[in-house]
Amino acid sequence: MNSIIKQELSNIIDKSDKIGVVSHLNPDGDNIGSILALGSSMEKLGKKVTILKSDFVPNDLLFLPNIEKIISVSDDLNFDVLFVLDSSDAERLGDNKRFIEKAKYIINIDHHISNNNFGHLNIVEPKASSTCEIIYNIISELNLPIDSNIATCIYTGISTDTGRFMYENVNENTHLIVSNLLALGTDIYYVNKKLYQSRSLSKTKLFIEVISSSKLFFDNKVSVAKVTLENLNRANARPEDSDGIVEFLRDTETVEVSVLLKEIETNLTRVSIRTKEYVDANEICNKFNGGGHLRAAGCTIQRNIDETEKLLIESIKQYI
Ligand code: 5GP
Ligand code: MN
């Protein structure tokens, strides 16, 4: 963060009383971790903070400290400043986009390379491992309050967005930050058990069914898995229970591109793409008005799941 941005951020926080912090659709550990960490820190500073969700919070994140502070929206909310975290564009907020339209001042904090700088102040750092890493740096540079609960939320975002410290977005700073988070009291054994060893039985059933019916294309370099509403019903699972399938299939030795298609309704399909070495996931999703990162991106396509599959296979062909 350069000194001008730091000064501006500090001024805005100083002079604002009513602060909003908002999440995006299909929120993940980095998104929920970052809104809780920043929101709780500013609350400790004495601000009136509203932490808003734009969608369901996945079950595996419900253990996070201060989770009860996250509220769904009511229409009469007004803020001096609205922080939008981990969201590459205003569309990522779904219906909550209206808060962006009426907020007096927007601060956009993100690490997506596809971020379109929709805020009045944009702190966009594509090299950061996660939005939580940026939030940690802001808290430490501005001397904002931090405690073990805030540290736990930040740790969660860094761990989940780096694939448990495995991806290319991890650097020496990431580990230095984690070292500080442990010193602040993050119980990593507890957090890791909650995040990675608490899968519900219905989620496991869904994984087995969806993975067994997944298909391979182009010399086993592209893997495609489909989650239909029927799959969800049979496993008694929720849509977010398919989180993790796309990474599991990516980790097959021959696979460069892993695609997960989720049926939302008959003519609406969510797409998640993961890549390993040479295909740009963000570039593929950009073509369908989505976005994300080099190795992880997503989009929503207004077609049925089988048509979407054909469309994507055709689009991925040129990169393989
Ligand atoms: P996921 O596949 O886990 O939903 O998303 C992977 C990454 O791509 C995340 O960083 C997410 O924020 C981003 N992403 C997913 N869907 C969209 C989308 O529709 N638009 C944009 N801009 N980014 C997305
Ligand atoms: Mn993120």
Image (cartoon, rainbow, N blue to C red):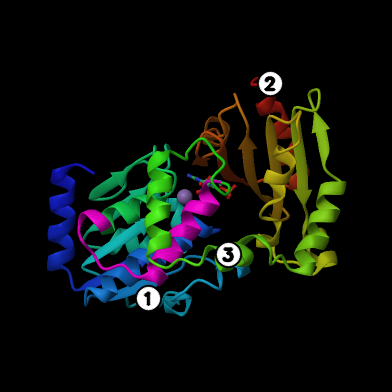
User: Residue extending furthest front?
Assistant: 183
Q: Is mark 3 within 8 Å of ligand 2?
A: no
Left or right, 267 with reference to 156: right
Magenta part, dominant SS: helix
Residue at 71%, 65% (x, y): give it.
199
Nearest to the eye among marks 1 and 2: give it.
Answer: 2
Horizontal side, residue 56 vs residue 169: left or right? right
* Circle 1 residue: 75
The range drawn in magenta is 140-162
173 lies above or below 216: below
Q: In x, y percent, where is residue 295?
A: 56, 36
Residue holding disc 2: 320
Question: Which mark is first along the chain, 2 or 1?
Answer: 1
| Viewer can see residue 227 | yes
Disc on the earlier residue, 2 or 3: 3
Q: CA distance from mark 1 to mark 2?
A: 47 Å
Magenta segment includes 148:
yes
- Kindly identify which numbered label has been placed on residue 189: 3
